[in-house]
Amino acid sequence: MTADSMQALVYTGAGELEVQVVAAPDPGPGEARIEIARCGICGTDLHLVLENYARPGSVLGHEWSGRIAALASDVDGWSLGDRVVAAPPPACGECRSCRRGRPAVCRRRGATDYLSFRGAFAEYVIADSSLLRRIPDKVDDRAAALTEPLAVALHALSLAAPEPDDRVLVTGAGPLGLLAIAALRARGVSDITVSEPASLRRDQAEKVGARRLIEPSDLADPPMGEPVTTPFDIAFECSGRADAAAAALDQLDRAGTLVLLGTGSTEPRFNHNRMIVLELVVLGSYNYDADGFDDALSMLSSDILPIDELVDPVEIGLLGVASAIRESADGKRRGKVLVDPSAARTDVHQ
């Protein structure tokens, strides 16, 4: 590659991805060019590719860690080679959502356009320097790539406010479910049951802190107007499956809370009468707390998280992303798949 070009994984349409040589981005005023060290494959990436939501010509990937490779002349406080992640733009702090402690849905901040942005399945990305967060020295590049999804899990915990003696159900032990389990354990919650159909992922859930492992078919059918025999105080739905969301609601005790983290294309149907009689709460959890990235970096540097069990042991280059996306969707990857864009530069289209 020349200084003006780079490799990037481009969505070409019909669920297809292609490694291409494209122009390397130049930082504008207040910006930094980041050389990507690792980028995680997110559930959003799976939906965008496998369900053909992505816009042809777009580059996906938003869970990254990297190093500053170039800086605009007006940027102070950063140096070439600094290891960083980038947080989202700050919320306004004044709208109704922000005043109620819900900055993730700030009414003055638009949603991320996942259909057209230039993401981190590439050698370089551009980031606003004001959003950069320094990676602690003791956090390596692969752990730092968990900052964004861990911030997602921590936001769900903030909304649900679990207490140490709560009984918690997690449905889905994919990468997000594993992070939720690990974050719960780090926050002192130990009574965690995980419902997951894939044996590989059930085993992984135990390694990151689940106390009980079950298959979805093991979940009890609820009696009318009453909790199940051994109900849960909180359920975190991390799979994005409509049937898992409905089943999780049915497992709640009186005044229980269901938090929806996983996204999916099929909408769940909830028993509203059950919600009324038991005064159940259903919450959507989107993105991060106001200080979510800082909190995630702090937890990652605390040595309390089982990083080796949260990430898949096999890292890949850009050429391996398409197959890893399919394997992740099929439950054949046991943790967060990390991509090294500098690896295996072959079969590149120009």
Image: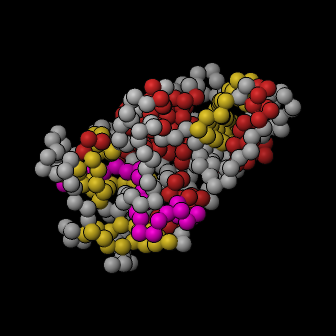
Residue 52 is left or right of residue 79, and the answer is right
Q: Is residue 52 magenta?
A: yes
Question: Residue 60 is drawn in which quadrant?
Answer: bottom left
Stretch in magenta: 48-70
167 vs 35: above or below:
above
Residue 25 is left or right of residue 166, and the answer is left
Q: Residue at x 59, y 38 (%)?
A: 284
Colour convention of the picture: secondary structure
Residue 213 position, x and y percent, is: 69, 40
Q: Is residue 262 magenta?
A: no
Question: Residue 89 is drawn in which quadrant?
Answer: top left
Q: Residue at x 56, y 25 (%)?
A: 161
Residue 75 is left or right of residue 9, and the answer is left
Q: Residue at x 18, y 43 (%)?
A: 78
Q: Nearer the viewer, residue 140 or 15?
A: 15
Q: Nearer the viewer, residue 268 or 294?
A: 268
Residue 340 is left or right of residue 27, and the answer is right
Q: Nearer the viewer, residue 347 or 102?
A: 102
Question: Residue 160 is drawn in which quadrant?
Answer: top right
